[in-house]
Protein backbone atom coordinates (compact mmCIF):
# COMPACT_ATOMS: atom_id res chain seq x y z
CA UNK A 1 0.00 0.00 0.00
CA UNK A 2 2.90 2.35 0.74
CA UNK A 3 4.55 1.88 -2.66
CA UNK A 4 2.28 0.35 -5.27
CA UNK A 5 4.85 0.81 -8.03
CA UNK A 6 7.17 -1.72 -6.38
CA UNK A 7 4.63 -4.56 -6.21
CA UNK A 8 5.31 -5.90 -9.75
CA UNK A 9 8.95 -6.43 -8.78
CA UNK A 10 8.11 -9.01 -6.11
CA UNK A 11 9.20 -12.41 -7.39
CA UNK A 12 6.33 -14.84 -7.94
CA UNK A 13 8.83 -17.70 -7.72
CA UNK A 14 9.75 -16.62 -4.20
CA UNK A 15 6.09 -16.48 -3.22
CA UNK A 16 5.52 -19.86 -4.85
CA UNK A 17 8.30 -21.43 -2.78
CA UNK A 18 6.71 -20.06 0.39
CA UNK A 19 3.23 -21.20 -0.65
CA UNK A 20 4.47 -24.74 -1.32
CA UNK A 21 6.22 -24.75 2.04
CA UNK A 22 3.01 -23.75 3.79
CA UNK A 23 0.93 -26.30 1.88
CA UNK A 24 3.03 -29.32 2.90
CA UNK A 25 1.97 -29.26 6.60
CA UNK A 26 -1.65 -28.83 5.54
CA UNK A 27 -1.41 -31.95 3.37
CA UNK A 28 0.78 -34.18 5.54
CA UNK A 29 -0.57 -33.03 8.91
CA UNK A 30 0.98 -31.32 11.90
CA UNK A 31 2.89 -34.46 12.87
CA UNK A 32 5.56 -33.37 10.40
CA UNK A 33 6.62 -30.81 12.99
CA UNK A 34 7.33 -33.62 15.43
CA UNK A 35 8.97 -36.09 13.08
CA UNK A 36 12.32 -35.75 14.82
CA UNK A 37 10.86 -36.80 18.14
CA UNK A 38 11.05 -40.36 19.36
CA UNK A 39 8.18 -42.81 19.43
CA UNK A 40 8.19 -42.61 23.20
CA UNK A 41 7.58 -38.87 22.99
CA UNK A 42 4.71 -39.53 20.61
CA UNK A 43 3.13 -41.91 23.14
CA UNK A 44 3.40 -39.29 25.85
CA UNK A 45 1.90 -36.63 23.61
CA UNK A 46 -0.99 -38.81 22.50
CA UNK A 47 -2.00 -39.39 26.11
CA UNK A 48 -2.54 -35.69 26.49
CA UNK A 49 -5.05 -33.45 24.77
CA UNK A 50 -2.32 -30.92 24.10
CA UNK A 51 -1.33 -32.69 20.90
CA UNK A 52 -4.74 -31.89 19.42
CA UNK A 53 -4.53 -28.26 20.52
CA UNK A 54 -1.08 -27.93 18.98
CA UNK A 55 -2.25 -29.72 15.85
CA UNK A 56 -5.17 -27.37 15.22
CA UNK A 57 -3.18 -24.28 16.20
CA UNK A 58 -0.40 -25.11 13.77
CA UNK A 59 -2.84 -25.83 10.96
CA UNK A 60 -4.73 -22.57 11.54
CA UNK A 61 -1.54 -20.50 11.57
CA UNK A 62 -0.18 -22.24 8.49
CA UNK A 63 -3.52 -21.80 6.70
CA UNK A 64 -3.49 -18.07 7.47
CA UNK A 65 0.09 -17.73 6.20
CA UNK A 66 -0.80 -19.73 3.09
CA UNK A 67 -3.84 -17.54 2.39
CA UNK A 68 -1.87 -14.31 2.83
CA UNK A 69 0.84 -15.59 0.49
CA UNK A 70 -1.73 -16.46 -2.18
CA UNK A 71 -3.29 -13.01 -1.75
CA UNK A 72 0.12 -11.41 -2.26
CA UNK A 73 0.63 -13.53 -5.39
CA UNK A 74 -2.69 -12.25 -6.70
CA UNK A 75 -1.73 -8.63 -6.07
CA UNK A 76 1.62 -9.05 -7.83
CA UNK A 77 -0.03 -10.75 -10.80
CA UNK A 78 -2.72 -8.05 -11.14
CA UNK A 79 -0.15 -5.26 -10.84
CA UNK A 80 1.84 -6.77 -13.71
CA UNK A 81 -1.32 -7.07 -15.82
CA UNK A 82 -2.03 -3.38 -15.19
CA UNK A 83 1.49 -2.50 -16.29
CA UNK A 84 1.01 -4.58 -19.42
CA UNK A 85 -2.26 -2.83 -20.28
CA UNK A 86 -0.62 0.57 -19.82
CA UNK A 87 2.30 -0.35 -22.10
CA UNK A 88 0.89 -2.84 -24.64
CA UNK A 89 3.62 -1.96 -27.14
CA UNK A 90 6.40 -2.57 -24.60
CA UNK A 91 5.65 -5.89 -22.86
CA UNK A 92 9.37 -6.43 -22.26
CA UNK A 93 9.30 -3.66 -19.65
CA UNK A 94 6.98 -5.68 -17.41
CA UNK A 95 8.91 -7.92 -14.95
CA UNK A 96 8.71 -11.60 -15.84
CA UNK A 97 9.65 -14.57 -13.64
CA UNK A 98 10.36 -16.98 -16.50
CA UNK A 99 14.14 -16.50 -16.44
CA UNK A 100 14.07 -16.31 -12.65
CA UNK A 101 12.30 -19.68 -12.48
CA UNK A 102 14.71 -21.38 -14.87
CA UNK A 103 17.76 -19.95 -13.10
CA UNK A 104 16.46 -20.96 -9.67
CA UNK A 105 15.61 -24.47 -10.86
CA UNK A 106 19.07 -24.86 -12.42
CA UNK A 107 20.81 -23.75 -9.21
CA UNK A 108 18.76 -26.07 -7.00
CA UNK A 109 19.10 -28.97 -9.43
CA UNK A 110 22.88 -28.60 -9.43
CA UNK A 111 22.83 -28.31 -5.64
CA UNK A 112 20.72 -31.44 -5.26
CA UNK A 113 23.02 -33.43 -7.56
CA UNK A 114 26.04 -32.26 -5.55
CA UNK A 115 24.33 -33.33 -2.32
CA UNK A 116 23.54 -36.77 -3.75
CA UNK A 117 27.11 -37.24 -4.98
CA UNK A 118 28.68 -36.14 -1.69
CA UNK A 119 26.29 -38.33 0.30
CA UNK A 120 26.92 -41.35 -1.93
CA UNK A 121 30.67 -40.91 -1.49
CA UNK A 122 30.28 -40.84 2.29
CA UNK A 123 28.02 -43.90 2.31
CA UNK A 124 29.87 -45.90 -0.36
CA UNK A 125 31.26 -48.22 2.30
CA UNK A 126 27.83 -49.60 3.13
CA UNK A 127 25.00 -50.90 0.91
CA UNK A 128 21.95 -48.85 0.02
CA UNK A 129 19.67 -48.61 3.03
CA UNK A 130 16.13 -47.55 3.66
CA UNK A 131 14.97 -45.21 6.36
CA UNK A 132 12.02 -46.20 8.55
CA UNK A 133 9.99 -43.88 10.70
CA UNK A 134 6.78 -44.07 12.67
CA UNK A 135 4.37 -41.16 12.51
CA UNK A 136 2.01 -39.96 15.21
CA UNK A 137 -0.67 -42.47 14.20
CA UNK A 138 1.72 -45.39 14.70
CA UNK A 139 1.98 -46.27 11.00
CA UNK A 140 5.38 -47.38 9.75
CA UNK A 141 6.79 -45.80 6.60
CA UNK A 142 9.86 -46.66 4.56
CA UNK A 143 11.86 -44.17 2.54
CA UNK A 144 14.88 -44.75 0.38
CA UNK A 145 17.92 -42.59 0.97
CA UNK A 146 17.39 -40.48 -2.16
CA UNK A 147 13.78 -39.82 -1.10
CA UNK A 148 14.95 -38.74 2.34
CA UNK A 149 17.56 -36.50 0.73
CA UNK A 150 14.91 -34.98 -1.55
CA UNK A 151 12.55 -34.17 1.32
CA UNK A 152 15.36 -32.61 3.31
CA UNK A 153 16.49 -30.61 0.26
CA UNK A 154 12.95 -29.26 -0.12
CA UNK A 155 13.36 -27.83 3.37
CA UNK A 156 16.63 -26.29 2.25
CA UNK A 157 14.87 -24.65 -0.71
CA UNK A 158 12.40 -23.09 1.73
CA UNK A 159 15.27 -21.80 3.87
CA UNK A 160 16.71 -20.13 0.76
CA UNK A 161 13.36 -18.61 -0.26
CA UNK A 162 15.04 -15.25 -1.00
CA UNK A 163 17.19 -16.70 -3.78
CA UNK A 164 14.58 -16.04 -6.53
CA UNK A 165 14.14 -12.46 -5.30
CA UNK A 166 17.91 -11.88 -5.42
CA UNK A 167 18.03 -13.24 -8.98
CA UNK A 168 15.00 -11.17 -10.00
CA UNK A 169 16.47 -7.98 -8.55
CA UNK A 170 19.61 -8.52 -10.64
CA UNK A 171 17.70 -9.29 -13.83
CA UNK A 172 15.18 -6.47 -13.43
CA UNK A 173 17.82 -3.97 -12.25
CA UNK A 174 15.47 -2.57 -9.64
CA UNK A 175 15.62 0.94 -8.24
CA UNK A 176 12.82 0.43 -5.70
CA UNK A 177 12.03 -1.57 -2.56
CA UNK A 178 9.72 -4.49 -3.41
CA UNK A 179 9.98 -6.16 0.03
CA UNK A 180 9.61 -4.57 3.44
CA UNK A 181 12.48 -5.24 5.83
CA UNK A 182 10.11 -6.69 8.42
CA UNK A 183 8.86 -9.18 5.82
CA UNK A 184 12.05 -10.80 4.55
CA UNK A 185 14.04 -10.43 7.77
CA UNK A 186 11.19 -11.81 9.89
CA UNK A 187 10.63 -14.86 7.69
CA UNK A 188 14.38 -15.49 7.56
CA UNK A 189 14.57 -15.47 11.36
CA UNK A 190 11.65 -17.91 11.59
CA UNK A 191 13.34 -20.27 9.11
CA UNK A 192 16.57 -20.14 11.15
CA UNK A 193 15.02 -21.06 14.51
CA UNK A 194 14.96 -24.87 13.89
CA UNK A 195 18.63 -24.85 12.88
CA UNK A 196 19.58 -22.82 15.94
CA UNK A 197 17.66 -25.25 18.14
CA UNK A 198 19.34 -28.27 16.50
CA UNK A 199 22.75 -26.72 17.02
CA UNK A 200 22.18 -25.78 20.66
CA UNK A 201 20.42 -28.93 21.85
CA UNK A 202 22.33 -31.71 23.55
CA UNK A 203 24.00 -34.12 21.10
CA UNK A 204 23.68 -37.05 23.52
CA UNK A 205 21.53 -39.77 21.89
CA UNK A 206 18.46 -41.10 23.62
CA UNK A 207 19.24 -44.66 24.81
CA UNK A 208 15.58 -45.59 25.21
CA UNK A 209 14.55 -45.86 21.56
CA UNK A 210 15.99 -47.47 18.49
CA UNK A 211 17.59 -45.48 15.72
CA UNK A 212 14.92 -46.73 13.31
CA UNK A 213 12.36 -44.48 14.99
CA UNK A 214 14.25 -41.38 13.97
CA UNK A 215 12.95 -39.92 10.74
CA UNK A 216 15.90 -37.56 10.23
CA UNK A 217 19.36 -39.04 10.17
CA UNK A 218 21.68 -36.68 12.11
CA UNK A 219 24.64 -37.93 10.09
CA UNK A 220 23.20 -36.37 6.95
CA UNK A 221 24.75 -33.04 5.98
CA UNK A 222 21.50 -31.06 6.33
CA UNK A 223 21.20 -31.86 10.05
CA UNK A 224 24.87 -32.02 10.97
CA UNK A 225 26.56 -29.27 12.94
CA UNK A 226 28.09 -27.99 9.71
CA UNK A 227 24.65 -27.78 8.08
CA UNK A 228 23.16 -26.01 11.09
CA UNK A 229 25.86 -23.34 10.67
CA UNK A 230 26.18 -23.14 6.89
CA UNK A 231 22.45 -22.96 6.14
CA UNK A 232 21.69 -20.04 8.53
CA UNK A 233 24.79 -18.16 7.35
CA UNK A 234 23.69 -18.54 3.72
CA UNK A 235 20.11 -17.50 4.52
CA UNK A 236 21.34 -14.40 6.37
CA UNK A 237 23.67 -13.64 3.45
CA UNK A 238 20.71 -13.72 1.04
CA UNK A 239 18.76 -11.37 3.32
CA UNK A 240 21.73 -8.97 3.40
CA UNK A 241 21.94 -9.06 -0.41
CA UNK A 242 18.23 -8.19 -0.71
CA UNK A 243 18.70 -5.34 1.78
CA UNK A 244 21.67 -3.94 -0.17
CA UNK A 245 19.87 -4.30 -3.50
CA UNK A 246 16.90 -2.34 -2.18
CA UNK A 247 18.97 0.28 -0.38
CA UNK A 248 21.14 1.03 -3.41
CA UNK A 249 19.84 1.06 -6.95
CA UNK A 250 21.39 -1.06 -9.68
CA UNK A 251 23.48 1.78 -11.09
CA UNK A 252 25.09 2.48 -7.73
CA UNK A 253 25.80 -1.22 -7.15
CA UNK A 254 27.33 -1.51 -10.62
CA UNK A 255 29.63 1.42 -9.91
CA UNK A 256 30.55 0.12 -6.46
CA UNK A 257 31.29 -3.46 -7.53
CA UNK A 258 34.16 -2.54 -9.81
CA UNK A 259 37.65 -4.05 -9.71
CA UNK A 260 39.88 -1.86 -11.83
CA UNK A 261 38.56 -2.07 -15.38
CA UNK A 262 36.42 -5.12 -14.58
CA UNK A 263 32.78 -4.62 -13.61
CA UNK A 264 31.15 -7.42 -11.63
CA UNK A 265 27.71 -6.30 -12.81
CA UNK A 266 26.86 -5.40 -16.41
CA UNK A 267 25.92 -1.87 -17.28
CA UNK A 268 22.35 -0.95 -16.49
CA UNK A 269 19.79 -0.89 -19.27
CA UNK A 270 16.38 0.70 -19.67
CA UNK A 271 14.74 -2.67 -20.34
CA UNK A 272 12.95 -2.92 -16.99
CA UNK A 273 12.92 0.80 -16.19
CA UNK A 274 10.14 1.44 -13.73
CA UNK A 275 7.05 2.91 -15.32
CA UNK A 276 5.45 6.05 -13.86
CA UNK A 277 2.63 5.49 -11.43
CA UNK A 278 -1.00 6.32 -12.09
CA UNK A 279 -0.86 9.21 -9.64
CA UNK A 280 2.08 10.70 -11.53
CA UNK A 281 0.24 10.25 -14.82
CA UNK A 282 -2.84 11.89 -13.29
CA UNK A 283 -0.75 14.87 -12.19
CA UNK A 284 0.66 15.20 -15.68
CA UNK A 285 -2.82 14.97 -17.19
CA UNK A 286 -4.19 17.55 -14.77
CA UNK A 287 -1.26 19.83 -15.55
CA UNK A 288 -1.89 19.53 -19.26
CA UNK A 289 -5.59 20.26 -18.77
CA UNK A 290 -4.80 23.32 -16.66
CA UNK A 291 -2.41 24.64 -19.29
CA UNK A 292 -5.02 24.06 -21.99
CA UNK A 293 -7.63 25.91 -19.89
CA UNK A 294 -5.31 28.88 -19.34
CA UNK A 295 -4.52 29.05 -23.04
CA UNK A 296 -8.21 28.96 -23.89
CA UNK A 297 -8.94 31.77 -21.41
CA UNK A 298 -6.17 33.87 -22.95
CA UNK A 299 -7.60 33.30 -26.42
CA UNK A 300 -11.05 34.37 -25.21
CA UNK A 301 -9.62 37.53 -23.63
CA UNK A 302 -7.81 38.39 -26.85
Image (tube, helix red, strand yellow):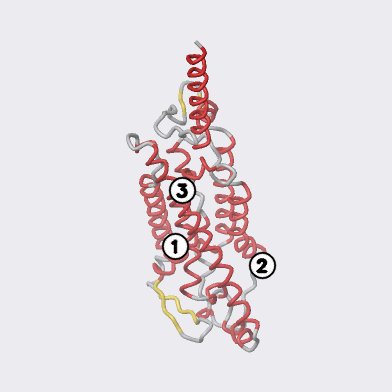
CA gap between label 1 and label 2 equals: 25 Å
Find residue 45 and report its horizontal and vertical position in percent.
Answer: 63, 84
Q: Earlier in the sequence, mark 3 or mark 1?
A: 3
- Crowding at dot 2, Cα within 10 Å, few <14 / some 14-19 / many 20+, comes out as few
Disc on res. 262? none
Q: Return the x and y of residue 200 as percentages of the image width and height.
A: 67, 63
Instruction: Find disc 3 in the rendering and name its residue.
Output: 11
Q: Nearer the viewer, residue 191 or 207?
A: 191
User: Which residue bears the numbered disc 1?
Assistant: 122
In-image side of 205 versus 281 (left or right): right
User: Which is nearer the eye, 162 or 39?
Assistant: 162
Q: Kindly state the secondary structure of the residue where label 2 is placed.
A: loop
Quarter-wise, where is residue 271 in the image?
A: top left
Q: As drawn, which residue projects farthest toward the bottom?
A: 47
Please determine whether, in this image, residue 258 is positioned above or below residue 201: above
Question: Element at badge 1?
Answer: helix
Residue 201, which numbered label?
Answer: 2
Disc 2 or 3, which lies upstream in sequence?
3
Front position among marks 1 and 2? 2
Q: Nearer the viewer, mark 3 or mark 1?
A: 3
- Farthest residue in the front direction? 301
Of tags 2 and 3, the one toward the viewer is 3
Amino acid sequence: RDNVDSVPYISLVMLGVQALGYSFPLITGAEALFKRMSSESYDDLEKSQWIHVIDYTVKILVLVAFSLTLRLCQKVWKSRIRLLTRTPLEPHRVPSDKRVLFTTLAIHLIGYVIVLISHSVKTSQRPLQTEKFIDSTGDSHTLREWETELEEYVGLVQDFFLLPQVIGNLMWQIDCKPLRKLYFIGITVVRLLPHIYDYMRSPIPNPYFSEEYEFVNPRVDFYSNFGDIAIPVTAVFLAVIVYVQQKWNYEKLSQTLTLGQCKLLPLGSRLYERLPSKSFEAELASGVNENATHEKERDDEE
